[in-house]
Amino acid sequence: HHPFSTNDKGNLVIGGVDSLTLAEKYGTPLYVYDVGIIRKNARSFIKAFENLDVKAKVAYASKAFSCIAMVQVANQEGLCLDVVSQGELFTALEAGFPSERIHMHGNNKSRHELKMAIDHQIGCIVIDNFYEIQLLEELLQQEGKTMDVLLRVTPGVELNTHQYIMTGNEDSKFGFNIVNGQADQAFQLLHNHKHIRLKGLHCHIGSQIFETEGFKVAVDLLFEQIEKWLDRDGFKPQVLNLGGGYGIRYTEIDNPLEYNVYVDEIVEAVKKNSERLNILMPEIWIEPGRSIVGNAGVSLYTVGSSKEIPGIRNYISVDGGMADNIRPALYEAKYEAVIANKATVKPIEKASIAGKACESGDMLIWDLPLPETEPGDILAVFATGAYGYAMASNYNRLAKPAVVFVEDGTDKLVVKGETAEDIIKNDLSYE
Ligand code: LLP
């Protein structure tokens, strides 16, 4: 189920480059991205809106994977950028990303982060809470500046069987709840504000979503609220941001929709509601993260020790694990993988892939079908492009792996791997 090919040596090829060459040249563990796939993903979202001839912005949620090179690719593809911290904003600015196409999220943006956003005149801030309104007012007043904002609302749908309620449900740390009137209170503070220009609404219903129903429910709920503000205050939103969450395939049990299906249905829902209220259709913004970079990333590891427990299980250990990909340990996330140097050899046995961290939970994949495997083989784990490097840690003082971009048969190092010296670089002596 992976989008990569093999060559006549039977090796896995990523972006036109033999993965064995990459493992040798840069060492393992290694994050490899096929940049062509990133571009294709970005373009399919942008194209879907263009085909419908509606005004839209596709912002890459850089929390999924941020580094200078990735931000540059996002810029080349004409995406906007969603940042959630000083670090992500700084990365974007250092990469030369135009500040007017950046918007900032976060449920506890610091004064410093807000000031940085104002000083660099970023495109918009997505307001999350009352304290933030207060901070923003103070800062804008001090500096005599204005800022465009969206109001992040929590629609408050309790649809317990569906995963898309994860962040859109009422009991969530994010945003202003509609049901209990907090959204209206915030609206009244911001509507016709001297320094804060309320452009519209934002909501994000969850992540790794495989159906469009949740988005449609959210749009209907947003418009119910908009209708009240239209009738009472004459408010017409210029922007409706529906967040990210578009699902991708990790294993065969995942059945993602084509990206244009999400876009088609979202546009349809916004159009229907705008017509009902007899207002101009707002510009539609979305914030895909995982669906831009997830399937473009492959993690390469070197196989080391193994342990056979007769009648129970075979464990095969690799040189990375939960420090470079926390998702299996944190979410029981599932992945597919092959031995990159035996990519065309039929699996004969099952083995479970263990990471090298001192923790039983550090297992990357359980019961993976594999050909006969020996130390020195290269394991390629697919679809690790989102929230892998982004959530990496130095647990066990493991060094973070390098990141390599490949495109059209050319490979380029874009993030250096950490060294042992990097690991202690902020340590100070106590003697
Ligand atoms: N917009 C907002 C406001 C978000 O909170 C998120 C993700 C996104 C956009 C992008 O969502 P995506 O398109 O990537 O699903 N660490 C977890 C995922 C956390 C997502 C948090 N918010 C994971 O590894 O699955």
Image: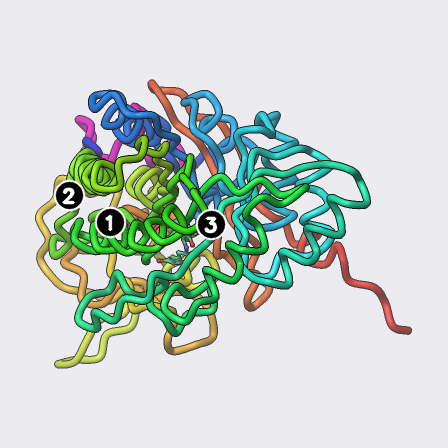
Q: Earlier in the sequence, mark 1 or mark 3?
A: 1
Judging by the rendered image, the residue that carries numbered circle 1 is: 247
**For this view, does 388 lie left or right of residue 7?**
right
Element under disc 1: loop
Q: How many marks?
A: 3
Q: Over which residues does the magenta segment extend? A: 6-22
User: Which residue is situated farthest in the front direction here?
Assistant: 232
The amino acid at mark 2 is Leu
Q: What's the residue at 22%, 55% (across, down)?
A: 217
Query: Pointer 3: residues within 10 angstroms few (<14), some, or many (20+)?
Result: many
Ligand 1 within 8 Å of disc 1? The answer is yes
* Frontmost residue, 352 versus 126: 126
Kindly tell me whether residue 288 is visible in this rendering.
Answer: yes
Element under disc 3: helix
Considering only vertical position in the picture, is 301 above or below 292? Answer: below
Q: Earlier in the sequence, mark 2 or mark 3?
A: 2
Judging by the rendered image, the residue that carries numbered circle 2 is: 257
Judging by the rendered image, the residue that carries numbered circle 3 is: 389
**Nearer the camera: disc 2 or disc 3:** 2
The image quarter containing residue 15 is top left
Task: State yes or no: discs 1 and 2 in contact (Cβ < 8 Å).
Answer: yes
Query: Pointer 1: residues within 10 angstroms few (<14), some, or many (20+)?
Result: many
Residue 116 location in percent, x, y?
Answer: 71, 42
Please say whether residue 8 is one of the residues in the magenta stretch: yes
Q: What's the residue at 61%, 34% (across, down)?
A: 122
Q: Quadrant of the C terminus?
A: bottom right
Residue 324 location in percent, x, y?
Answer: 45, 56
Q: Earlier in the sequence, mark 1 or mark 2?
A: 1
The amino acid at mark 1 is Gly
Residue 271 location in percent, x, y?
Answer: 22, 36
The amino acid at mark 3 is Tyr
Element under disc 2: loop
